[in-house]
Structure formats: structure tokens, C-alpha cells
Image (cartoon, rainbow, N blue to C red):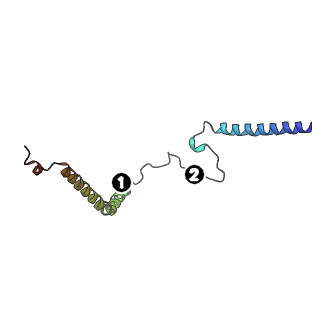
Amino acid sequence: MLTFTLQTEVVEFVARQVCQRAVSFLGTMGRHFGDLAKIRHVVTYSISPFEQRAFPNYFSKGIPNVWRRFKTSVFKVAPPMVLMYLTYTWGNRVHEQTKRKNPADYENDQ
């Protein structure tokens, strides 16, 4: 009788564990993507979208910054691109010339 009682207690314990896990899984359904799991010891802060400024200093700092970054990188990027373009167009031109028939080969045909 003692073994039967232990077996039923074990079965009941396992059933409770499975039910708890199922309930915790079902508890995550319907949540938003960022709230699926609770992570301990991690604190996140956010500002309300109504308190944020969408484009602060856009014209006074943003456009001059883009121009400055463009000026510093154009001389690093443009020469290799121009060289690749010239190589590509030269290769296409030579390929088209090699596909043509040579008229001198057919001068004596009848």
C-alpha cells in the first residue's frame, strides 16, 4: 500500500508540474512581442512618444553633418567606383568587338 501511495503522489506531483508549465505558457499568449518573458534584474527606461521631439535640430545640425560626412568620404569612394565603371564599359566594348565577324575573312567568297 505504501508503494501505491508513493506512486500516486509522484503522478500527482508530475501532473501539477505539467499544469503549471502549461498555465505559464498560456499566460504568455496575447502579450506583445517585447513582453513575452520577464527577465529579472534588467531595468528598462523609456520616454513617452508625446515627450519626444521627432526631428530636433534637423536643419541646423543634420544637413551640415550630412554634407561634412559626404565631403570626407567622397574622395575615398568615388575613385574606385569610377575605375570599376571604366573597366566594366571597356570590357563590354571589347566583348562586343570580339563577337563581330571580320569582313576581311570573307573577301574572296563567292
- Which residue is labeled 1 in the image? 59
Q: Position of 46 compared to 39: left or right? A: left
Foreground pick, 90 / 75: 90
Looking at the rendered structure, the kind of residue marked 1 is Phe
Q: What element carries label 1?
A: helix
- Write down the quadrant of residue 109 in the picture: top left
Mark 1 / mark 2, whichever is N-terminal? 2
Whether residue 4 is situated above or below residue 107 in the rendered picture: above
- What residue sits 24% from the left and 57% below the top? 86
Foreground pick, 91 / 8: 91
- What residue sits 66% from the left and 39% below the top? 25
Within-10-Å neighbours for mark 1: few <14, some 14–19, many 20+: few
Q: Which residue lies furthest to the right in this view?
A: 1
- Write down the quadrant of residue 41 in the picture: bottom right
Cα separation between marks 1 and 2: 29 Å
| Tag shown at residue 31 | none
Q: Is mark 2 on a helix, strand or loop?
A: loop
Looking at the rendered structure, the kind of residue marked 2 is Tyr
- Write down the quadrant of residue 21 in the picture: top right
- What residue sits 77% from the left and 36% below the top? 15
Within-10-Å neighbours for mark 2: few <14, some 14–19, many 20+: few
Q: Position of 59 compared to 37: left or right? A: left
- Which residue is labeled 2 in the image? 45
